[in-house]
Image (tube, grey):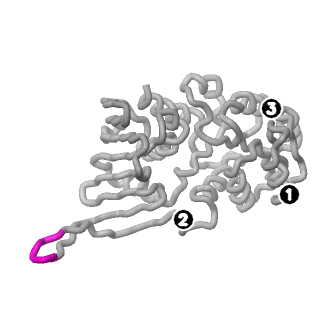
Amino acid sequence: MKLSIFGTSKIIHHHIKAAKNNSFEIFSICTSNKNSKNIKEIAKKYQIQKIYYNWKLFIENSYQNKSSVLIAGRIKDNKKVLSYCLKHNLKVLIEKPIFIKDNEFNDFLVFKKNIFLAYNRIYYQNILKIKKIIKKEVPNNIYIKCPESNIKNIVLNTCHIISIAYHLIGKLTLIKKIKNRDSIFCIFKSKKKIPVYIHINFGAPDNFSFEFNFKKIRATLNPIEKLTIFDKLIKKKYRNNNIYHPNISETINEYKLSKFKPGFNLQYLNFNKFLRNQKSEFINISDAREIVSICNKIIN
């Protein structure tokens, strides 16, 4: 199975390693930057024979050789590159968020069967574990912290976190928003009426994190790659005082589970199934639009 790559940033190395582990042959690579040093270094390191600087020729050659395409370049190039791929009926794996405005997705919604979003965090074992718990028991509430650097990053970066919430509990309806210069606090509600509190703190020295509160357990993702499940309080004596500590029943550290960037190997396993028209787990173009829509509701 062939994969052609548009883009030469550092993330490409992680894509290639996971792709090759899932039976992909890296067929070609392209950049629109004629002065790029990265493209030659990547091609040499992974023995990629075909290098392109003309993105149209790159796509046409991918079509002729029955290769799917990874689009992981600049956001401003996504519309033209994705459109040309779809014109040739190619199947595409594209880096999130694709676009930054809701209406930019509209012309692409009919291509659900061709577009697979690279939201790798939904493939974390941590997230799969939480999803199993939620299937058995609806959480009382979910609290999400996002220490963003600036408001523009909410679509570009917080979208990763929103994708997890969306993947776990579906669409979110904004109930209330409190906004000031340094923070944005939103209350959302899911279809199953789960309250979701999203707190954006600009410049805060903190991790992106989730807290899931169930009837008898509490689960945290802090940072997102580390799951901790608490199941009860333990009483300990300290200087004649009772001190209570939450008991940890389980932890999962995503970085210790695989040699690949977290989520990437399972992402490519599912992309492989997607290309074969087999049942696969992924975020499609309609989901991607909804995720960006939630981000824009937080901003505006």
Q: From mark 3 to mark 1, how far is it between C-alphas?
A: 28 Å
Disc 3 or 1, which lies upstream in sequence?
1
Viewer-proximal residue among 117 and 297: 297
| Picture coordinates of residue 160, whole percent (x, y) | 52, 44
Residues at circles 2 and 1 in contact by the CB criterion of under 8 Å? no
Main secondary structure type of the part rendered in magenta: strand
Disc 2 or 1, which lies upstream in sequence?
1
The residue under label 3 is 88
Residue extent of the magenta highlight: 237-243
- Three-letter amino acid code of the residue under disc 2: Tyr
Quarter placement of the C terminus? top left
- Three-letter amino acid code of the residue under disc 1: Lys
Res. 35 image quadrant: top right
The image's mark for residue 44 is 1
- SS class of the residue under badge 3? loop
Q: From mark 2 to mark 1, how far is it between C-alphas?
A: 28 Å
Q: Is 245 a magenta residue?
A: no
Viewer-proximal residue among 141 and 31: 31
User: Can residue 33 be spotted in the picture?
Assistant: yes
The image's mark for residue 255 is 2
